[in-house]
Image (cartoon, rainbow, N blue to C red):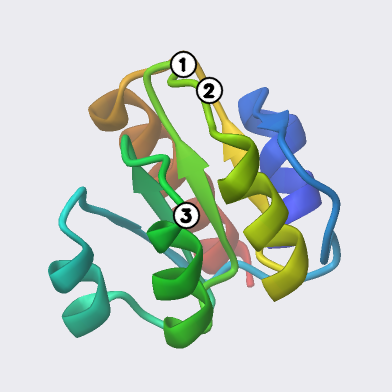
Amino acid sequence: MKIAEIADKLGLEVVNEGQWEREAKCCYASDMLSDVLANGGEGCLWITRQSHPNIVAVAAIRGMAGIIITGGKQISPDTIEKAGQEQVMIFSTPKQTCELAGMLYMLLSNEVERG
């Protein structure tokens, strides 16, 4: 499913412009950068409460489809700037990680079942 469609269906706030047509294959929820480096998959949407610039580097290294920052956290201008440079989409939501992960899982699962 394209990340633009996911953002629309889940009511995600777009933090920066980027690759709207990119496909998201899965989601991964973690706040530990080392965990995401070891286990985050290419094409996944990463759900986290972290908002510092290092999240962009991790997402770029792993080839992730984008980052969703939960809990309504403020995102630093440095993170947004780095995301633009690395062409990593960032979204924000006031929803908590568990709630958003469940919603995204159901959305992606339904897409797989139909496809």
Disc tally is: 3
Residue drawn at (63%, 72%) of the image: 115
Cβ–Cβ below 8 Å for labels 2 and 3? Answer: no
Looking at marks 2 and 3 on the same chain, the residue that comes earlier in the sequence is marked by: 3
Q: Which of the labelled discs sits on residue 53, or is there none? A: 3
Looking at marks 3 and 1 on the same chain, the residue that comes earlier in the sequence is marked by: 3
- The amino acid at mark 3 is Pro
Label 1: which residue? 72
User: Under tag 1, what secondary structure?
Assistant: loop
User: Under tag 2, what secondary structure?
Assistant: loop
Nearer to us of marks 2 and 3 is 3
Above or below 3: residue 47 = above
Label 2: which residue? 93
Cβ–Cβ below 8 Å for labels 1 and 2? Answer: yes
- The amino acid at mark 1 is Gly
Q: Residues within 10 Å of mark 3 (few under 14, many from 20)?
A: some
Q: Residues within 10 Å of mark 2 (few under 14, many from 20)?
A: some
Provide residue 87's location: percent of width, then percent of height.
74, 70
Question: In 3D space, how far apart are the residues under numbered discs 3 and 1 (Cα atoms)?
Answer: 17 Å
Give the left or right position of residue 46, taking residue 30 as reference. Answer: right
- The amino acid at mark 2 is Thr
Nearer to us of marks 1 and 2 is 1
Report which quarter residue 76 is drawn in. Answer: top right
Cβ–Cβ below 8 Å for labels 3 and 1? Answer: no
Looking at marks 1 and 2 on the same chain, the residue that comes earlier in the sequence is marked by: 1
Above or below 23: residue 10 = above
Give the left or right position of residue 69, taking residue 77 as reference. Answer: left
Above or below 9: residue 42 = below
